[in-house]
Amino acid sequence: MKYQKIILFLITAVLCTEGTGCKDYLEANPSTQVSDQVLFKNANGAQTLLNGIYSYIRLRNQDVEYGTVIQFSNGFDAAGNDLIVRNSMGQLQVYYAHNLAETRADALLTRNVWEYFYTIINNANIILDNIDESAGEQSQKDLIKGQALAIRGWAYFYLVRFYQQTYAIAKEMPGIPYYSKGATTVGMPREKVSTVYTNIVNDLQSSIELLAPMSRSFKSQINQRVAQGFLAEVYLVMEDWTKAAELAKSAKTGFPLMNADDYRSGFNDWSKEEWMWAAPQTVDANFGNASPFTLWANQTRGDRWTFDFMFVNDKFKDLFETDDVRNQFRLRTDVGLWTSDKFRDAADYYGDVVLMRASEMYLIEAESHARMGNEANAKEVLWQLQDQRNTSRTTSTGPQLIEDILTERRKELYAEGFAWFDLIRNQKPVHREGDHPLKPEIAARSWKFILQLPIGEFTSNTNLNPGDQNPYEGIYTP
């Protein structure tokens, strides 16, 4: 991907401020482009671009299939085994049905994923290229730099998982083009997966150090704990269990698990103590019909628009004990499918969207200990979560303990953007049972899990040739 030698977006307003709501806009019109020399005259200009990147991460998009990480999280969770998309007028069927060649090079999905994350990376790079020379207090510049590094590492982590098999079996395989400088006019070749991960780790480690003094104003911003959470996720995929456990333990500090009332309150309020990172909605900055709350078939939005097509599989529902606070399922007798009340919109219909919670960190820590054979430690951490959710403590050992923790991940984090990547990471298949209306079979390590590079990249990037493309079909054998 080539970039113009200018800032791609002019930001005309900043992040949310209390009492005024969010008025954040990114304009891509060439008439509003501004040179880096002008924008980075001082650190306030860099802060403006950083605010714009945050806005772009959760950019409003009326399309529920494509657009931002919020849409991708919904869609790729629907691509797994636990959710059902019914009568959706085509919406999200690109994920659920697996019959529209969504991973192929000429598909809109792979192009949209590619452009979204590389746009974020390019703008983070532009900050990193210029921040050190900007006028301003060093403390302010360090915090801007720390956030930009975390964002770059986060975006590359998504890309390398979308476009290649999981690290444990693919570390020596071609990953994605890696750009360490912004606004480049030269496309880069595919970098080895292990090298991409090394760069991601370096970015996140540096960000953690720089963000130590940060006291953020809003949970839409990335602070040290969120950066630690990113790195815990990375180490989990890399199977560096010791570091994954350590980072997850640190990341969740200060974010107590939600009690039963909070968990059942609708997942729409970023003030909940367990929420580590979140995207706000307001009257001035919202997702419109692309809000994830419009997807669910729980009929809780009154007279507001709802797609009314997201359900849960009955076999998945059966994993929950009766008194589990997460057991919020009810049968829609009119369609004969189970819906969930986990996600319900706020009273003003502008519910906030969760991006990271402490419960994920508990599960990373527990799984990492279990995989190291530290079963007592694994259960101690896991039981804290299970006790808070009012479900039975896991007593299994050995490989079954690991499987039980993975099941707990499914129960705790469903529809929060983890299902697809967990199938890839754990080399498991798409295999649906029960009341799924569609039951495609995708074998573990199938190339259908992995996006092909968008076809346009081979036109614009002279450092790629047809032999650099991912397969579209078949199963990868390590």
Image (cartoon, rainbow, N blue to C red):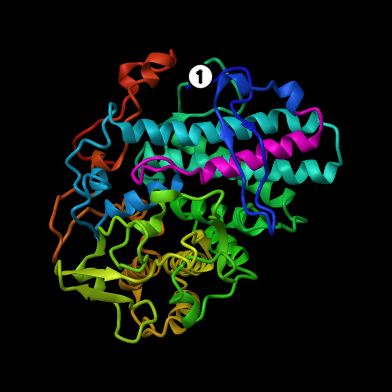
Q: Secondary structure at mark 1?
A: loop
Q: Position of residue 38 (x, y in %)?
A: 76, 23
Specify start and end residues of the magenta stretch as a single range.
Answer: 40-67
Q: Is residue 175 above or below residue 380?
A: above
Q: Is residue 204 above or below residue 254?
A: above
Q: Position of residue 323 (x, y in %)?
A: 34, 87
Q: Position of residue 292 (x, y in %)?
A: 39, 56
Q: Position of residue 367 (x, y in %)?
A: 43, 66
Q: Is residue 73 above or below residue 395?
A: above
Q: Which corner quadrant of the image does residue 296 belong to?
A: bottom left
Residue depicted at 44% across the width and 16% down the height:
461
Q: Quadrant of the C terminus?
A: top left
Residue depicted at 29% across the width and 52% down the height:
427
Horizontal relation, residue 165 to residue 145: left or right: left
The residue indicated by pointer 1 is 2
Q: Does the magenta segment cover residue 60?
A: yes
Outermost residue toward the front in this view:
303
Q: Does the magenta segment cover residue 318?
A: no
Residue depicted at 39% across the width and 34% down the height:
112
Amino acid carrying label 1: it is Lys
